[in-house]
Structures are given as structure tokens and as C-alpha cells.
């Protein structure tokens, strides 16, 4: 099997031994040089939405897990409306990915609605 076949996944099936788990301790957490960060959030209530709004206003991207909100539709809609308003205020973008994730971006960042590898 050639190098390109390994990279592109051609031929043969994969086993657990083909994958390597990355240790986060090996990755530098120094982000002082970064102009923007991507934050991961779990939203379980209104207080979490406030933290997300502040983060987007500060110019960072948030990927929010809204799985815990599924039980109360009015809460979900209220939080989604608030986050949509923030994205609009900062001229950013917002998308809902399935029933469990939202991505909210600040000024100058757009989220493509086209999946990679799905171009016709």
C-alpha cells in the first residue's frame, strides 16, 4: 500500500491499531499569538448562553452542545433566538447542526453550508 493510499484511505479496512490517541499534554496551550480562539460550550441553561454571547462579542468562535436543552422547547427557542441576535449584531454567523450543536461566529467569519467532499 502506497503513501497516498494510506492518506486517502484507499484499500483495506482500518483497525483500532491504525489510529493514535493524541495526548493533550503534548499540545501547547499557549494561545497568546492567536487572533481568535474556538471555544466548546455545553448549554444547560440561560447562564451558559450569557457566557457564549460574551465570547462571541470578544471575537471568538463557539461550538455549543445543546443536547441538555432538548427537554424544554421554549428554553431552547429562547436561547437560540438570543444567540441568533448576537450573531446578527456582530455581523457574524450562526448555524444549527442537527438537534444537538450550534456554531456561532464573530465578525468576519462565515460558516459554509456546503459539506466538504459533497460538491457536485
Image (cartoon, grey):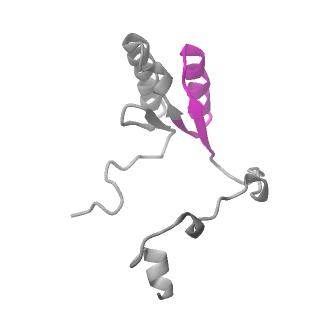
Numbered disc total:
0
Q: Is residue 59 visible?
A: no
Residue 59 counted in the magenta span: yes
The residue that appears at 38% across and 17% down in the rendered structure is 77
Q: Is residue 56 visible?
A: yes
Query: Does residue 26 lie above or below 8 as drawn?
Result: above
Please state which of residues 19 and 67 is positioned toward the viewer in this rendering: 19
Please state which of residues 40 and 54 is positioned toward the viewer in this rendering: 40
The residue that appears at 42% across and 15% down in the rendered structure is 71
Q: Quadrant of residue 42?
A: top right
Residue 99 counted in the magenta span: no
Q: Quadrant of residue 44?
A: top right
Location of residue 20 in the rendering, given as x and y in whole percent from the top left corner: 63, 64
The residue that appears at 59% across and 68% down in the rendered structure is 17
Query: Does residue 89 lie above or below 1 as drawn?
Result: above
Location of residue 18 in the rendering, given as x and y in whole percent from the top left corner: 56, 69
The residue that appears at 61% across and 32% down in the rendered structure is 55
Provide the residue span drawn in magenta. 37-63
Q: Residue at the bottom extreme?
A: 2
Location of residue 109 in the rendering, given as x and y in whole percent from the top left corner: 47, 46
Left or right: residue 80 versus residue 31 is left
Image quadrant for the C terminus?
Answer: bottom left
Location of residue 88 in the rendering, given as x and y in whole percent from the top left corner: 42, 30
Amino acid at each position: 500500500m502506497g503513501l497516498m493510499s494510506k492518506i486517502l484511505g484507499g484499500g483495506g479496512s482500518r483497525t483500532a491499531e491504525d489510529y493514535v490517541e493524541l495526548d493533550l499534554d503534548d499540545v501547547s496551550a499557549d494561545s497568546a499569538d492567536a487572533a481568535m480562539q474556538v471555544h466548546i460550550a455545553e448549554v444547560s441553561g440561560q447562564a451558559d448562553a450569557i457566557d457564549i454571547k460574551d465570547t462571541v462579542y470578544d471575537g471568538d468562535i463557539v461550538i455549543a452542545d445543546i443536547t441538555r436543552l432538548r427537554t424544554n422547547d421554549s428554553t431552547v427557542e429562547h436561547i437560540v433566538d438570543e444567540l441568533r441576535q448576537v450573531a446578527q449584531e456582530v455581523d457574524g454567523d450562526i448555524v444549527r447542526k442537527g438537534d444537538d450543536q450550534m456554531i456561532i461566529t464573530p465578525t468576519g467569519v462565515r460558516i459554509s453550508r456546503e459539506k466538504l467532499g459533497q460538491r457536485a
